[in-house]
Image (tube, helix red, strand yellow):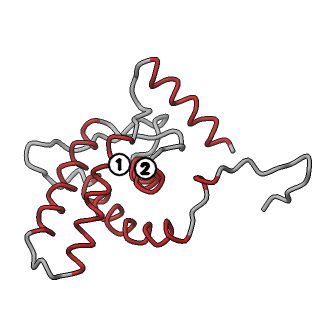
Amino acid sequence: STLATPWNQPEFEAHDVLWAAEAKESFGLLPAIAGISALVMDASLPMGVFGAVESPGPEAPPLGSGALALLQAALHNDVKMWPIAMPDAARVRWEYTLRSMRYLSGSVDEDDERSATVEAAMSQCLKALPRVPNDGGHGSCRAFGDRLKRMAFSAL
């Protein structure tokens, strides 16, 4: 923990703090994201036409960083961490699994509170998935600027 002094002020913004409501919300999202992450990254698990996620090289960001970035995007509507690995094969498998789980949870008894909670978590993750970048490939100038911004935030 850092002591706040006049010459060493904390540089946190209000949206960087995990408030009580967001903490409670994260407990609803964590099991879903952790479970789906295990399915998405399992190379031995076939998912129809969607191929397995290739293991990145030793200098690439770890594949699990995409799951953590998804949680951050779902809670804060923004991703500030860097680097993140979300290759196209992983993104497609994430979307397929999230949509399948949302569909299956909606086909269960409508009065079941658990299925409504799962359906809400899947919908929230699906809405956040496009905000998760991929730092493993080459991107546009806009993506490079976004990457620099996230590098600065991750250094805080």
Q: Within 10 Å of the Cα at label 1, are there few (<14), some (14-19), or many (20+) other Cα atoms?
A: many
Q: Position of residue 22 (x, y in %)?
A: 49, 65
For the point 39% across and 51% down, which residue is it? Answer: 70
> What whole-number distance in Å separates the C-alpha atoms at marks 1 and 2?
5 Å
Q: Position of residue 33 (x, y in %)?
A: 34, 61
Q: Quadrant of the N terminus?
A: bottom right
- Give the number of the disc on residue 128: 1
Viewer-proximal residue, 15 or 71? 15
Q: Earlier in the sequence, mark 1 or mark 2?
A: 2
Which residue is label 2 attached to? 73
Residue 62 as seen in the image, left or right of residue 8: left
Above or below — where is 137 with respect to 110? above
* Residues marked 1 and 2 touching at CB (< 8 Å): yes
Residue 56 appears in which quarter of the rendering? top left
The kind of residue on which mark 2 rests is Ala
The residue shown at (13%, 52%) is 46
The spot of residue 102 in percent (x, y) is 18, 62
Give how far across and how far down residue 111 sits, in percent.
15, 82
Is residue 106 left or right of 142 when viewed as pictured?
A: left
